[in-house]
Image (tube, rainbow, N blue to C red):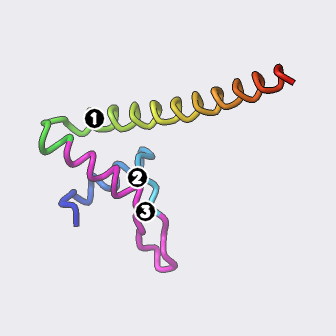
Amino acid sequence: MLGIQTYTLRYYERIGIIEPARSPGNIRLYSERDIALLRRAKTLMDDMGVNLAGVEVILRMAQRVNELQNHMEELESEVEKLRGADNL
């Protein structure tokens, strides 16, 4: 489907980059998130010449940046609530 080798898919699964669900017959079911990550990985490898280890680092860093952005939004929301409480 995406032109990614089976061993690469299994590697990404083993290291936790993707987490496909399983059917009752034990067939891997890839989510939209998994497919988006795989597309990004393929672009990094094919278009930018990044090797498999580099792709792992980049995807993990992107995931961490996303987590930190979400946390920052939560903190900003909490600050706004506290500022609103001070005005009462």
Residue 32 part of the magenta segment: yes
* Residue that carries the numbered disc 3 in the rendered image: 31
- Asked if 52 appears above or below 34 in the picture, the reply is above
* Residue that carries the numbered disc 2 in the rendered image: 13
* Residue that carries the numbered disc 1 in the rendered image: 53
- Mark 2 neighbour density, 10 Å: few (under 14) some (14–19) many (20 or more): some
Query: Magenta segment range?
Result: 21-43
Seen at 41% across and 52% down, the residue is 18
Seen at 26% across and 32% down, the residue is 54
- Mark 3 neighbour density, 10 Å: few (under 14) some (14–19) many (20 or more): few
Q: Give the x, y percent position of residue 35.
A: 34, 58
Seen at 26% across and 60% down, the residue is 6
> Which quadrant of the figure contains the N terminus?
bottom left
Q: CA distance from mark 1 to mark 3?
A: 23 Å
Residue 17 part of the magenta segment: no
Q: Give the x, y percent position of residue 26.
A: 46, 73
Q: CA distance from mark 1 to mark 2?
A: 14 Å
Q: Amino acid at mark 1?
A: Ala
Q: Amino acid at mark 3?
A: Ser
Q: Is residue 59 left or right of residue 44?
A: right
